């Protein structure tokens, strides 16, 4: 079978030679495909033949013994022997039979069922066919090449002179390109095309490279592309044993931020040591922190600045000989968002402006939460009031305490407890015995907590809680629902109507006091809120004046007149406070005096 296949291969090769010699142009890779098909077919045929030809050893033994009767069934008997299933070996008699068959093989030569002369002829034919096939393959391309060469246009065989190939221009000539970008080189010819054009690249530091220039269009323009320009170099174009002039290519880089290192110096009251944060563009700091920035670049620059949201800019210190710009120490008082703008010596700016964000958290004052008593309350002259508050600060308390006054008079201040350095939380408590103060029914106790910490300027800063009131009522009134009397029904109705009006006026005056106290704690809105307070106090004064006309009791008129006098003083002081915040506390005392007078009116 192998001889037949090799013969077929030789025949196909001869056919290819014949076609090539007759001028027929064979398609590309024809020979390769023919070889592939024949080899694949040979392997397939061998595999199929092996699967189909399973050996029947008994039949082979019978065929051999028919030609050699002198064996006397020795070979057939040996083939039928089976080893012992347990040991897997032949016993003595079986081995004797097998050895006898082997001796017969040597003596008779019965394995040579096919004549040696026939096998020799078949082998010789196979080798002849294989040699013919190989020789033909080495020759099959030669005629085809000659045929193809004969079909080329005549002008390609012509010699190329100055009139046929003249180099007019080389693009881009001398150039400057960005580092890492590609560069296309085009050679423009006229009056014909060169046989060959080569781009010769000579790096400043490196080996010379030669690139073939390729013509892609009908125009006589040859080109090549350098995929990435990493450094300066020179280049020229060589064609038909001639050379162009030498051109230079330089590289440049846009300025770019590579790393930003921040140095943070925290305020002394925080107790936080100075630290450096490497390669960061976003920071969170407390108010008053001093920030210094070092921006490491890819190259030196001529100038740099940080541009804020409202186009406010901060100039940076540039180092002409170093790829570095620095932000001088800057005290931070508010959140800043910047864009980094860089300009090199050639006027090039950075393509992308990195964003720098510094979030500044304010140094908040202490937080005061009143635990007891729960807001305003009515008390008797014999009570003891326990004042308790939880106080907390973000960086550490200095002092804390309780302040109160009676009837809008002088403020009494008590410092409560001791505060350790850096203590963040504290529980403040104080017991106030009204009996020892000899308070009387109708008086008003105003009170509030306060706490001190260190402000952004490094100085002690005091914060206040809301102001609350303890109205002193007669002991009997605290423990009874109402108050009886021998007044007529008409008098009771008059008193009830007056009480309702006074209670409304007391509520309004209390709101004015709280608003004034809040403005004292947070004077930032003084210019806007003070006129509102003046208007509110003036309305309360008008209502008091109207009540003064309506009441008939001389004692009630005295209380209302005292309240009106205090309100007039408060209006005048609040008006002055729009320009002088120090007038708020005297105004607050007058407001409290009016509130005290109204309480006495209600209690009489």
Image (spheres, rainbow, N blue to C red):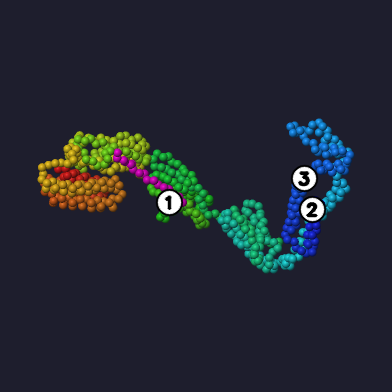
Which SS class for mark 2?
Answer: helix
Quarter assignment of residue 133: bottom right
The structure residue drawn at horizontal position 18% and vertical position 40%, both measured from the top left corner, is 481
Mark 3 highlights which residue? 54
Q: Is residue 152 magenta?
A: no
Relative to 365, 560 lies left or right = left
Mark closer to the chain start, 3 or 2: 2
Mark 1 highlights which residue? 337
The structure residue drawn at horizontal position 60% and vertical position 58%, both measured from the top left corner, is 183
Label 3 – label 2 distance at C-alpha: 22 Å
- Residue 77 lies, in percent from the top left, at 82, 37
Quarter assignment of residue 391: top left
Relative to 370, 556 lies left or right = left
The structure residue drawn at horizontal position 64% and vertical position 59%, both measured from the top left corner, is 224
Between circles 3 and 2, the one closer to the viewer is 3
Per the rendering, the mark at residue 409 is none
Mark 2 highlights which residue? 5
Q: Is residue 358 magenta?
A: yes
In-front residue for pair 539/14: 14
The structure residue drawn at horizontal position 25% and vertical position 53%, both measured from the top left corner, is 531
Magenta span: 355-371
């Amino acid at each position: 079978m192998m001889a037949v296949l090799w013969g077929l291969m030789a025949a196909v090769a001869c056919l290819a030679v014949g076609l090539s010699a007759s001028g027929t142009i064979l398609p590309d890779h024809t020979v390769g495909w023919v070889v592939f098909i024949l080899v694949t077919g040979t392997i397939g045929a061998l595999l199929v033949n092996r699967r189909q030809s399973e050996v029947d050893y008994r039949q082979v033994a019978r065929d051999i013994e028919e030609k050699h009767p002198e064996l006397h069934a020795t070979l057939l008997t040996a083939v039928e022997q089976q080893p012992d299933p347990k040991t897997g070996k032949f016993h003595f008699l079986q081995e004797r039979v097998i050895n006898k068959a082997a001796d017969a093989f040597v003596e008779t030569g019965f394995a040579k069922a096919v004549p040696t002369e026939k096998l020799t002829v078949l082998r010789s034919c196979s080798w002849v066919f294989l040699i013919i096939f190989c020789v033909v393959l080495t020759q099959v391309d030669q005629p085809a090449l000659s045929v193809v060469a004969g079909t080329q246009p005549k002008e390609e065989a012509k010699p190329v002179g100055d009139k046929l190939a003249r180099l007019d221009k080389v693009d881009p000539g001398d150039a400057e390109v960005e580092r890492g970008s590609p560069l296309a080189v085009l050679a423009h010819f006229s009056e014909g095309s060169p046989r060959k054009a080569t781009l010769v690249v000579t790096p400043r530091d490196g080996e010379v490279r030669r690139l073939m220039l390729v013509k892609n269009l009908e125009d006589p323009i040859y080109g090549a592309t350098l995929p990435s320009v990493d450094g300066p170099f020179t280049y020229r174009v060589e064609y038909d044993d001639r050379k162009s002039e030498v051109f230079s290519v330089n590289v440049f880089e846009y300025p770019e931020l590579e790393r930003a290192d921040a140095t943070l110096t925290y305020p002394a009251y925080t107790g936080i040591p100075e630290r450096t944060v490497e390669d960061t563009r976003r920071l969170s700091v407390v108010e008053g922190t001093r920030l210094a920035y070092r921006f490491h670049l890819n190259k030196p620059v001529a100038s740099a600045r940080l541009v804020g949201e409202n186009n406010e800019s901060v100039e940076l210190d540039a180092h002409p000989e170093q790829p570095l710009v620095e932000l001088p120490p800057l005290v931070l008082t508010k959140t800043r968002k910047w864009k980094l703008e860089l300009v090199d010596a050639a006027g090039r700016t950075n393509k992308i402006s990195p964003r720098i964000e510094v979030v500044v958290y304010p140094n908040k004052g202490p937080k005061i939460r009143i635990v007891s008593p729960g807001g305003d309350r009515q008390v008797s002259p014999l009570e003891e009031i326990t004042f308790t508050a939880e106080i907390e600060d973000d960086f550490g308390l200095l002092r804390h305490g309780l302040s109160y006054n009676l009837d809008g008079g002088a403020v009494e201040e008590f410092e409560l407890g001791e505060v350790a350095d850096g203590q963040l939380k504290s529980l403040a408590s104080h017991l106030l015995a009204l009996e020892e103060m000899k308070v009387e029914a109708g008086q008003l106790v105003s009170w509030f907590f306060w706490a001190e910490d260190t402000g952004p300027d490094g100085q002690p800063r005091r914060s206040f809680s809301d102001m609350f009131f303890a109205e002193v009522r007669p002991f009997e009134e605290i423990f009874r629902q109402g108050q009886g009397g021998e007044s007529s029904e008409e008098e009771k109705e008059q008193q009830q109507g007056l009480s309702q009006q006074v209670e409304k006026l007391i509520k309004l005056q209390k709101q004015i006091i709280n608003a004034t106290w809040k403005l004292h704690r947070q004077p930032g809105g003084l210019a806007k809120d003070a006129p509102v307070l003046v208007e509110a106090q003036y309305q309360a004064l008008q209502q008091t004046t109207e009540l003064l006309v309506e009441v008939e009791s001389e004692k009630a008129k005295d209380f209302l007149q005292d309240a009106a006098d205090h309100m007039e003083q408060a209006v005048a002081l609040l008006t002055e406070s729009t320009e002088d915040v120090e007038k708020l506390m005297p105004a607050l005392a007058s407001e409290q005096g009016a509130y005290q007078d109204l309480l006495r009116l209600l209690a009489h």
